[in-house]
Amino acid sequence: MLHTVNKSPFDRNSLESCLRFAHQGHSILLFEDGVYGALKGTRFETLLTEALKSYNIYVLVPDIEARGMRTDGIIEGIKPTDYAGFVDLVAQTKAVQAWL
């Protein structure tokens, strides 16, 4: 299953809810304002570093760049992807769960 999170973890608990309900081996894509959760040095870094042991976590690079950030600020282990990679993730999974 692919879980998508597009809300900032600083504004909503979508990311934390996603991590509570996702199962081992699922993939998580952070996009739009959800990309803020992928940044080093935030209170979510430990949570996501631990989650990387169970989930494949991706971040949409165009959304990182649109917010004036760079991929070198992403937590180690989170995989940067582009729009084509986003489409591939959707195509490879049987279901997509959007966390709003």
Image (tube, rainbow, N blue to C red):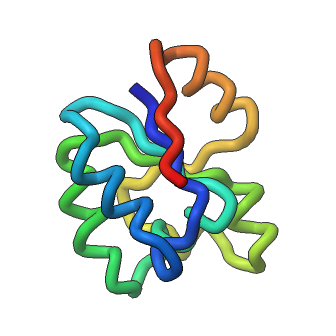
Residue depicted at 45% across the width and 39% down the height: 3
Residue depicted at 39% across the width and 36% down the height: 27
Residue 89: image quadrant is top right
Give the vertical position of 44 relative to 17 (above or below): below
Question: Which quadrant is home to the N terminus?
Answer: top left
Q: Name the foreground residue: 71 vs 7.
A: 7
| Percent coordinates x, y for residue 87 in the rendering | 68, 26
- Please give left or right for residue 82 compared with residue 54 in the image: right
Give the vertical position of 43 relative to 55 (above or below): below
Residue depicted at 22% across the width and 52% down the height: 20
Give the vertical position of 50 relative to 94 (above or below): below
Residue 41: image quadrant is bottom left
Give the vertical position of 2 relative to 68 (above or below): above
Q: How many marks?
A: 0
| Percent coordinates x, y for residue 19 in the rendering | 28, 52
| Percent coordinates x, y for residue 14 in the rendering | 43, 60
Residue depicted at 76% across the width and 67% down the height: 65
| Percent coordinates x, y for residue 32 in the rendering | 68, 60
Residue 75: image quadrant is bottom left
Q: Name the foreground residue: 13 vs 4.
A: 13
Question: Which quadrant is home to the C terminus?
Answer: bottom right
- Please give left or right for residue 1 compared with residue 68 in the image: left
